[in-house]
Image (tube, rainbow, N blue to C red):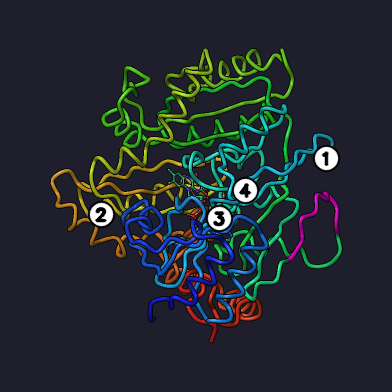
Amino acid sequence: MPPLSDTLIEKFKAVVGISGVITAPADQEPFVEEERGLYRGVCDAVILPATTEQVSQVVTICSENNLPITPQGGNTGLCGGAVAHGGIILSLKRMNKILNIDPLNQTMTVESGVILASIQAAAEDTGFLFPLSLGAEGSCLIGGNLATNAGGVNVLRYGNSRELVLGLEVVLADGRIWNGLRGLRKDNTGYDLKHLFMGSEGTLGIITKAVLKLFPYPKTKETALLALPGLDEAAQIFSASKENMGDSLSAFELISHTALSLTTKHISGIKAPFENVHAQYVLIEFTSPQEGSNLRDSVEAFLGGIFEQGLAEDGVIAESQSQALDLWRLRESIPEAQKIEGGSIKHDVSVPVSSIIDFLTKATNLVEAEMPGIRVCSFGHFGDGNIHFNLTQPKDMDRHAFMDQWNHFNRLIHDLVNSMGGSFSAEHGIGQLKVGELEKYKDPVELELMKTIKKSLDPMMILNPGKIIRNIQ
Ligand SMILES: Cc1cc2nc3c(=O)[nH]c(=O)nc-3n(C[C@H](O)[C@H](O)[C@H](O)COP(=O)(O)OP(=O)(O)OC[C@H]3O[C@@H](n4cnc5c(N)ncnc54)[C@H](O)[C@@H]3O)c2cc1C
């Protein structure tokens, strides 16, 4: 594709101002670099609009000139969705205003460029919780979260991103603005279009504003880490937690011994929480919206029962907020620790919760038989059936030789997941990384329907080309 003409650059500058158009390669660096180093982006210009109207005008110019647009939030996505291959990167960073908080309706209206952590903080300041929470929350933007339908650690209690949204404003591929910015909890007036755009990773429209659901801020919180002899016990404790603790159960994370040992080895400030080695660990969080509730007593009684039944070998309940954060840090640092340890081949998969043990057992046998010495570093959102089945290279193997096996191991694991009725991408999306997997595993009728939708909303395929849908024929 030829570079952008000066005339087009001037047109963009006229819309967003001189500082809103970045053409110097050195200044484009943060927008073309990608978290995992799997891809490197290329673009003619980074355009930073400050209002929905500016987004609309920029998209109109692109549409008139058949110019590809890669929408970008915080650029923290894990599937290369925000990595451009020519055309413009449309960064939403400047659209960073919180527009309204409605305490009675329990909603917050935001522009799509607000950092997730700022939304959480603004909610907390007014006594509310915005429950979306994930490792990248200090840098990802809400538009990116919604465009990827991000999951995170509180899905068990509050649902995925799409369940936290009442309304959206979206700029379409021809520049029109769809105003669906409604704060309604009931609205059965035909197709619910907002769900088309959430999870579409910028391939159907550009999310510019959202009405988000807020929840009462939990006044009490108890966080516990339990050490278990095996996976069966994790399943039994999960089932018992749901039965006995009801809605107070807000997170239930599984951490394998390998995952925990890598964090204590590599991440400074993280100490081994237990003296002995155990096969699995679960990090459980319970919350209550009531001040002075007897949550602590209930949790202690519940965990006492767990120990009496011999389901856990050791355990710790956080005595302070900072101890709770330390326990979460242990969980959130696993990917960083894996990176330091060497090559890792990743699988973000889901199966029905009732099939997790079966999956983990079969998948572990499969990969260990394939490559002796490979280390299964599994962890994830057990309560959602979502396991990050990550493989760390054998200790003495060359990193590159191991990473060359990425597709081979993906095939083994994704075939297994598919045979169990699961998903090869539970929460990270498709981007460009998993386009081939989508074509292989998606039901053909479903894939046809997806292409039909793409064709009708973006017939010129200028919105994030090469992501999710490669062609519409
Ligand atoms: C340390 C770490 C931990 C993570 N943990 C989790 C986790 O627990 N759960 C989980 O689900 N994900 C997780 N992720 C990945 C997660 O999807 C992203 O971090 C986040 O949701 C993406 O937001 P972003 O603003 O960075 O989007 P980007 O990376 O900038 O973009 C992601 C996709 O959305 C599109 N997009 C961005 N903004 C818009 C917009 N306004 N309109 C239309 N399309 C847009 C882009 O084109 C791209 O396809 C993690 C990532 C990291 C680095």
Residue, disc 4: 160
What residue range appears in magenta?
A: 178-187
Residue, disc 1: 105
Amino acid of disc 1: Asn
* Residue at x 36%, y 19% (from the top left corner): 274
Q: In the image, residue 158 lies at what x, y percent? A: 67, 41
User: Disc 3 or 2, which lies upstream in sequence?
Assistant: 3
Q: Which mark is residue 92?
A: 3
Q: Element under label 3? A: loop
| Viewer-nearest of discs 3 and 2 | 3
Q: Count the labels in the image.
A: 4
| Residue 350 shown left or right of residue 404 in the figure | right
Q: Do the residues bearing badges 2 and 4 touch, measured as CB atoms within 8 Å?
A: no
Image quarter of the N terminus: bottom left
Q: Is residue 35 magenta?
A: no
Residue, disc 2: 369
Q: In the image, residue 407 lies at what x, y percent? A: 31, 64
Mark 4 CB near ligand 1 (8 Å cut): yes
| Residue 352 shown left or right of residue 403 in the figure | right
* Residue at x 43%, y 59% (from the top left corner): 79
* Residue at x 53%, y 37% (from the top left corner): 235
